[in-house]
Structures are given as structure tokens and as C-alpha cells.
Amino acid sequence: MAKSVVSIVRNKDASYAVKKSIELVGGLEDKIEKNARVLLKPNLVYGVTYETGTTTNPAVLRTLVELIRPITKDIALIESNFGIVPIPESPMPIYKEVGKVFKLPEFEAMKKLGVRLVDLTKEKKRSFSLTPNKILDSVEIPVDLYDGATLVNAAVLKSHGITTVTLGIKNLYGLIPTPPIRNRLHGTISTVLSDLAELFSSIFTVIDGSVGMEGPSSCFGAPVGSDLMIASDNVVAADSVGTRVMGYNPENIGHIAEAAKRGLGNLDDIEVKGETIEKVKKKFNMDMQLPHNIVRKVKDLGTAKEEDLLPLYPSDNDLVRRYLKTFVMYGPLVRDGETYRFETKLFKNFICRKCVQTGHSFCAGWKQI
């Protein structure tokens, strides 16, 4: 297998970082055919803002479209519904339907550029024979939409309670448009994700680390302002580099290692252009108890200042501060000047209490509070 090329760019300007990262790996002209039908797959979880580290930065999507349009104007932004009940009462509105997310102001730029916004849940679906594993054979997906299309994958640099990291390959999970089916497949997720990487090998992957996310939850954690962009025409190599940037070994990440064993990409034989992995590497924290402890402490004290909470994680005070920022954005904490207080109504509508995946140990911790 030929050596894969992956670029790493660090810059506070996300648009510049996207352009430079793609330039370093040779641009898109020889990777996307003229007038091809392109499907751009971001990570748009619940429609929350990219400042949470949960979803793809709109500036990244806009820049990708601007780079693709000289090659083809047949571009669709695609995403599936989310596995959670709507939470309109939260400080940050959280939606189940991706159609409502597409109506948010940040997607107006996409429409003006002629991009179609496609709700995969509403596309015609059928099942078909997929891989020898047979796990996905009964899963209905929008086959006709995917057939013959070029996939551009715009993932986010973030951690995940089940798969440790969620990068390019994990972002393909959203190509299965039905949340209950995705939840049912969690028990075999490494094989399922490897199947998806084999079936829908993205022609190009950009991992958006302008703001990433660390923590054990797949949809809620502490934002990480990494100012990074990782790009490659090989999703396995991109994920391998992204995993190492997050301080983990891709050989220990089930779906990435399995995809590499299938010959879908390299874990080690990679030429990295731009920044070195060592220069930008930061271990993403997966402490399961810290977010619970922060909220519990504020609740027990009634009101708390930052200085009351920093001792909960003395080795990284900044992580506590970033979790506090998240709790104010999502709830259940409210900030009054320099003081934080617990808000019962917000906690009842808190995203992790509303999550349908109640079997996760991370979610169970919120029930105890």
C-alpha cells in the first residue's frame, strides 16, 4: 500500500486552515471529477453551536463548498436525525430533526452557494447486501442517493464514550439515517464502522479541530480550542493522525485498527505535512466523574465560585473552566457574574438526562444527581 499523506495545520482562522490543509495534500482537483455529484457529510449533532466542540464549524463547511464549486456545483450537505427528544427549554435549543437544524441562520450561506440541504431521514431507503459480516444487511439506507456520489467527510476532533475517538470513520455512522438502528448497532460498532469505511470510502476527509471536544460523552463534553485542521484523501490515515494528536494509539481504537487490517489505509506509514504530531498533541481527557462532580458540588453549595471548583481537578484547572463554560451553554448551571448556581428546571431538561442511551455509564451518573 502506498504511503498516505496527511496534513496538519494550526491557525485560528478556520477558513485559512482548511484551505492550507487541503493545499498541502495536493488540492481537490485530482480527487473530485469534473461535474461530479458531491455529498458533504458534516457532524451536526442536535444543531448546537460549534463552540461546544460537538459540531462542524460552519466556516469549515462554507470553505469546503467554495473549494469544491469550481470543480462541480452539484453539492449536497447531508445529515441524519438525532437520537434524542427535542429540548427547546435548554439555554441552547436542541433538536431531534435535522430539518430544523438546516433552518438555523448559519446554513443560509450554504443555500446562497447553491448547496442542497438533504435530510437523510426523508430520502427513499432500501436494504441491500453489504459485506460478508452481514450485520448491516437488514439496515435500510438511502442507496440511490449514495450510489455514484463522491463523499467529502467533514468530521470533528472529539472524544467518545464508546469508541474513545470520533473522527472521520465514526462520522460515517450518520449515513445510517435511523437513530434507533444506530443505537442497536453499538454492540458491534467497530465492525459496523469498518464496514461503513469500506462501503463509503470518503474521497476526502477533513477533521475540524478549530474547536474539538474532550470528555466521555459523545455529544457533551468540554470544548477544546485546538485551532487545528487535519486533511487527507484516506480516512484511515486521517483518523490515525487525529487519534495520535488526541494522545491515543490508533492500534487500540477498534474501528480504526479493523479498517486498517482490511487494507483501507495506513496507521503508521504516513507522511505528515505541516505541523508535526508531537508539536500539536494534547491528551484528550476521558475522566467520567469530573463533570458529575462539578455539578454536584455546585448543587451542594447552593452557589459556587470558580475557586471553589478548581480543586476538583487540580492537575488541569483549565478543564474545569471549560466544563463550566459547557454547563452554562447547555445547562444545568447558570452564571451570575463570578458565581455559578444549579438550576433544577434546566437539569430536568439537561441533554444527558434526556438521552435515550440510558445504558451508558456516563449517562447513569446524571441520574444519581
Image (cartoon, rainbow, N blue to C red):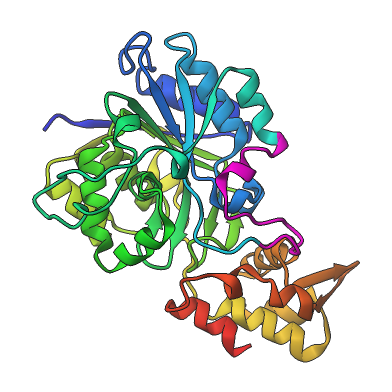
Seen at 19% across and 52% down, the residue is 137
Q: Is residue 96 magenta?
A: yes
259 displayed left or right of 116: left
Seen at 38% across and 17% down, the residue is 28
Q: Residue furthest left?
A: 132
Q: Residue furthest right?
A: 337
Seen at 54% across and 70% down, the residue is 355
Quarter occupied by residue 11: top right
> In the image, residue 97 lies at what x, y percent?
57, 50
Is residue 272 in view? no
> In the image, residue 362 lies at what x, y percent?
49, 77
159 displayed left or right of 182: right
258 displayed left or right of 205: left
Quarter occupied by residue 279: top left
Q: Is residue 178 magenta?
A: no
Q: Nearer the viewer, residue 6 or 330?
A: 330
72 displayed left or right of 305: left
- Range of the magenta residues? 87-105
Q: Quadrant of the N terminus?
A: top left
Is residue 310 in view? yes
Seen at 32% across and 44% down, the residue is 141
Q: Main secondary structure of the magenta part?
A: loop
> In the image, residue 19 lies at what x, y percent?
51, 22
In the image, residue 268 sits, relative to residue 317, either above or below, namely: above
In the image, residue 67 sits, relative to residue 103, either above or below, namely: above
Quarter occupied by residue 205: top left
Q: Nearer the viewer, residue 82 or 260?
A: 82
